[in-house]
Image: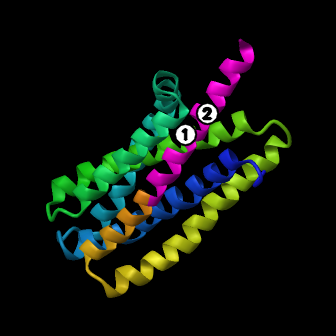
C-alpha cells in the first residue's frame, strides 16, 4: 500500500493530524489551569469538545460530496490551522471556541481520510485500513512525545507555533492529495471518452 502515493499521503495525514490533535489535548489542560485558573474538574470537562467531533464526523461525507475528497481535506486542514491561531490568544472564550473548531475539523478530516483509504485500496482493504490506524497511533505517540518536550521548555506561543508547523505540513499533504485526485479524475474522464 505504501507504493500507492495517495495511500501513502493518507497515512501521513493520519500521522500528522492525530499527532497534532493529541498534542493539543495533552497539554492544553495545563494552560487552562495555570493561565486561566480553572479547576481540574472544569479542565476535565474540556473533553466534552469531543462531541463536536461526533457531529462533524457524520457531516464529513456531505462535505466530501459537495467539495470532493481533496478540497474537503484542504478545507478541514485550513479550519484546523485557523483554530490553532485562535488558541494562541490569551482569552478563555477564544480558547474554548477555537478548541471546538479544531476538534470538529480534526474528526471530520479523520473520518474523511479513513473513508478515503477504503475507496483507494482496491485489494487488501483491511491491511490498508490497519496501516492508516497504525500511522494514526504512531503519530499520537511520537508527535505527542516531541510536543511534550517543546511544551516543557518553551512558551505557549512557541508550542502553538510548533503545532502550526505540523498543520502547515498537513496542509501540504492534503494539497498534494487533492492534486493527485484531480489528476486521477482527469485520467478517468479521458479514458471514458
Please identify the quarter of the rendering in which residue 52 is found: top left
Residue 23, percent from left and from top: 44, 67
Main secondary structure type of the part rendered in magenta: helix
Residue ID at (18%, 53%): 94
Work out whether residue 51 can be spotted. no
Left or right of 154, for residue 125: right
Name the residue tied to disc 2: 183
Where 171 falls versus 56 (above or below)? below
Residue 152 falls within the magenta-colored stretch: no
Please identify the quarter of the rendering in which residue 41 is found: bottom left
Left or right of 43, for residue 93: left
Q: Residue furthest left?
A: 91
Where 77 falls versus 159 (above or below)? above
Marks 1 and 2: in contact by CB < 8 Å? yes
61 or 169: nearer the eye?
Answer: 169
Cα distance, mark 2 to mark 1?
Answer: 6 Å
173 or 17: nearer the eye?
Answer: 173
The span shown in magenta is 169-193
Residue ID at (78%, 50%): 1
Which label belongs to residue 179?
1
Residue ID at (46%, 26%): 67
Where 76 falls versus 152 (above or below)? above
Residue ID at (64%, 37%): 116
Amino acid at each position: 500500500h505504501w507504493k500507492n502515493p495517495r495511500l501513502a499521503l493518507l497515512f501521513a495525514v493520519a500521522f500528522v493530524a492525530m499527532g497534532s490533535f493529541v498534542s493539543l489535548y495533552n497539554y492544553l489542560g495545563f494552560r487552562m489551569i495555570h493561565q486561566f485558573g480553572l479547576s481540574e474538574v472544569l479542565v476535565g470537562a474540556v473533553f466534552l469538545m469531543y462531541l463536536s467531533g461526533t457531529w462533524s464526523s457524520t457531516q464529513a461525507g456531505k462535505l466530501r460530496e459537495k467539495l470532493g475528497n481533496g478540497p474537503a481535506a484542504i478545507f478541514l486542514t485550513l479550519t484546523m490551522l485557523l483554530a490553532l491561531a485562535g488558541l494562541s490568544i490569551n482569552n478563555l472564550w477564544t480558547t474554548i471556541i477555537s478548541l471546538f473548531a479544531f476538534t470538529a475539523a480534526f474528526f471530520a478530516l479523520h473520518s474523511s481520510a479513513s473513508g478515503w483509504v477504503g475507496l483507494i485500496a482496491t485489494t487488501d482493504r483491511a491491511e490498508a485500513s490497519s496501516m492508516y490506524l497504525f500511522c494514526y497511533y504512531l503519530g499520537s505517540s511520537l508527535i505527542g512525545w516531541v510536543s511534550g518536550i517543546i511544551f516543557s521548555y518553551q512558551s505557549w506561543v512557541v508550542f502553538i507555533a510548533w503545532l502550526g508547523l505540523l498543520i502547515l505540513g498537513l496542509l501540504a499533504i492534503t494539497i498534494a492529495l487533492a492534486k493527485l485526485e484531480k489528476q486521477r479524475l482527469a485520467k478517468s474522464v479521458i479514458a471514458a471518452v
